[in-house]
Each structure stands twice: as C-alpha cells, then as structure tokens.
Amino acid sequence: MKKDIRSYSKEALRDYFVSQGQQSFRGNQVYEWLWKKNAHTFEEMTNLSKETRLFLEEHFSINHIAVDNIQRSTDGTVKNAVKLHDGLVVESVMIPTENRTTACVSSQVGCAMGCTFCATARLKKQRNLLPDEIYDQVAAISKESELLYGHKLTNIVFMGMGEPLLNYENVMKAIDKITSEEGLGMSPRRITLSTVGIPKMIKRMADDQVKFNLALSLHSAIDEVRSKMMPVNISNNLDELMDALQYWHQKTGNRITFEYVVWKGINDKQKDIDALVHYCKQVPAKVNLIEYNPIDDGAFEQASPIIIEQYVSELEKNGIIVNIRRSRGKDIDAACGQLANKS
C-alpha cells in the first residue's frame, strides 16, 4: 500500500530524498506543492523532473478530498459534500457577506455527542478527520470564494460536523498548517473553535496557549434543562464547565462566545434568562442568539420574537454583549445543526 505523503513533515521529506540519493531541497519543493499550492497530483509538481514525479507516484499517494456535490443557497451560501479518500462524506459550508467569507468546516465523520436538536447527531460517528482532510476543506472553500466573490477566505469556524475537541491532535495540527506561512497563512485570530463543552480539553487548549477564539454551544445555563438536550452536560456540568472557561480566560486573556438558541417551551422563561445572565457574569463573554433551524421532526420550535427581545434586553441591561445571528443556507440544509449528508 502506498504511503500518504502528507503524513510526512518537511524534515522527513528532506531526509527521504537524501536517502534516495537526491538533494534535500527536493523535500522543500514537494512540501510547498502539497500545502501552500495544495497540489492534488504529483503531475502538478512541474519544478520536479518527470522521473522524480513518476517515482513519487509509484511510492506515495495524495489522499486529497474531492468536492463531490455543491449546493448554492438563494442567500449565496455554498454547501460542499466532501468525499474522503475512503469514500466517506462530510459537509462544509461557505458563508459569504459583503466584505468577508467564512468557512464552516467539519472535524469528524458524524458525531457522538447526541445533542437532540442537531441533525448531525443522528449520524453515527464513523471516524476522526485527518489534519489534511480538515485543511483541504478550508483550501477548497478559499478557492471557491475567489472564484465566486473575487476574494480569499477571511474567517474559519469549526462548527461543522463533529466535536473538534474529541479530535484534538488532528484539529490542532490542521490549524497549525492553516495558520503557517508554509500553508494558508491565515491569522489564528480569524479562527473560532466551537465545542459542546468538555472541561478537561478546554483546559488543555489553554495550557497549549492556542491563539484562536473559543465558542461554546450553551443553550441553557440550568443543568437540568441543558442535560436533557445535551447529554455531555450529565458528565460535564455547568459548574465544571465554568471552572474550565475561567481557566481558559486566565491563561489566554480571551473572551468566550456563548452560542444560544431559544426554543419555545424549553428555555423561554424568565428563570432561563436570569440563569444565562448569572452565568455570563462569571467570565468575560458575549452571547450570540442563534436562529433555530428545524431538522424535520418538529420537536423543537423557535421561541417568539418577544422572548428573544427579552433575552437581549436583560443581557444588555447587565452589560453583556449580545448579537442576534440570522441563519444562512437553510434552503439547502447548510445552516447550524442541519448538516446530515442528505445530499
């Protein structure tokens, strides 16, 4: 079986070429083609001799993703069905606005977290994505952004399929490549990792002194309510989570973003609003109130605009930054919580 050449570091590629009686700088050239130029084939590596390209083809593979299906929403949002080298499929989304383009990328095939309001949770988790598979999603969306909107990608959110903190090593390696000048050269400040909240992994990120932003899928600041929607809360309750978030802020100095959907009959009472205000006061944070995107069975329903305004009013009155986020790409099942490989 051929080895995946993108599993090699630049140093390992240099050493490999030396072991084959060639000059080490060939390793630099191949590495640049693989990452900065995002080559899909060895044939594209035109500054290598034909003999070298054939040798690489014989001994190595480039397990590149293939964008298998593209859907475009009426609001400009683009959803990619991304086929992996083993035939499995994940989805990633490009969200354009007037002056920026955001890539929403997946970190796992399926998800094991079981959140009851999310379509991805209904897919079994099949495996973690490798660093190059995450990187490829970003590179593909950046290329689409230039083609459709005339500018490169500006932001990345890890809010697609899967829980990023349960694929920690590969996600961190992918972000390193994305932010490296030898990769896509993006600023880590333009990357946001979204998690359901795994305290020990949030602390690990803080200890690793990551430079990107942290978002937490909260949806209730009352343990009983949150545990019914998000099984992770049963073993990682809100107090443990807050301890980890305070540790994160202490280590990084960065504010946390709470993602919060308000549902009719679930978290639309005054006690829910009061609990959120109290929770936000324990650590520097802002709140994104997110429009709910139905996932067919009607078990969850968006709360009324009056309740949303009550949330906004109470949060602002207490000095907490709050934004209302309108969903994009709902008509192609590309909005938050809707990624389920229907295509």
Image (spheres, helix red, strand yellow):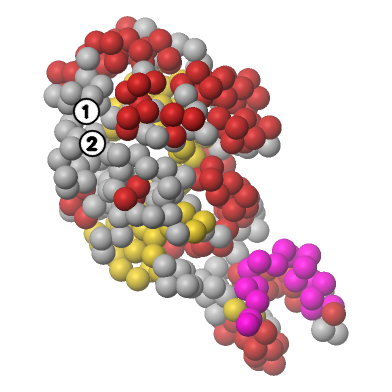
Q: Residue 194 falls in which quadrant of the image? A: top left
Residue at the image point whose x is 43% and y is 54% from the top: 125
Callout 2 touching callout 1 (CB < 8 Å)? yes
Residue at the image point whose x is 51% and y is 24% from the top: 241
The amino acid type found where label 2 is placed reads Tyr
Between 93 and 244, the residue placed more toward the observer is 244
Q: Which residue is mark 2?
A: 292
Label at residue 263: 1
Residue at the image point whose x is 37% and y is 7% from the top: 318
Between 28 and 317, the residue placed more toward the observer is 317
Q: Position of residue 86 (x, y in %)?
A: 47, 72
On screen, residue 312 versus residue 190, left or right, reads left
On screen, residue 305 versus residue 248, left or right, reads left
Q: Which stretch appears magenta? A: 1-18
The amino acid type found where label 1 is placed reads Trp
Q: Position of residue 89 (x, y in %)?
A: 39, 65
Q: Secondary structure at mark 1?
A: loop
Q: Secondary structure at mark 2?
A: loop
On screen, residue 264 versus residue 96, left or right, reads left
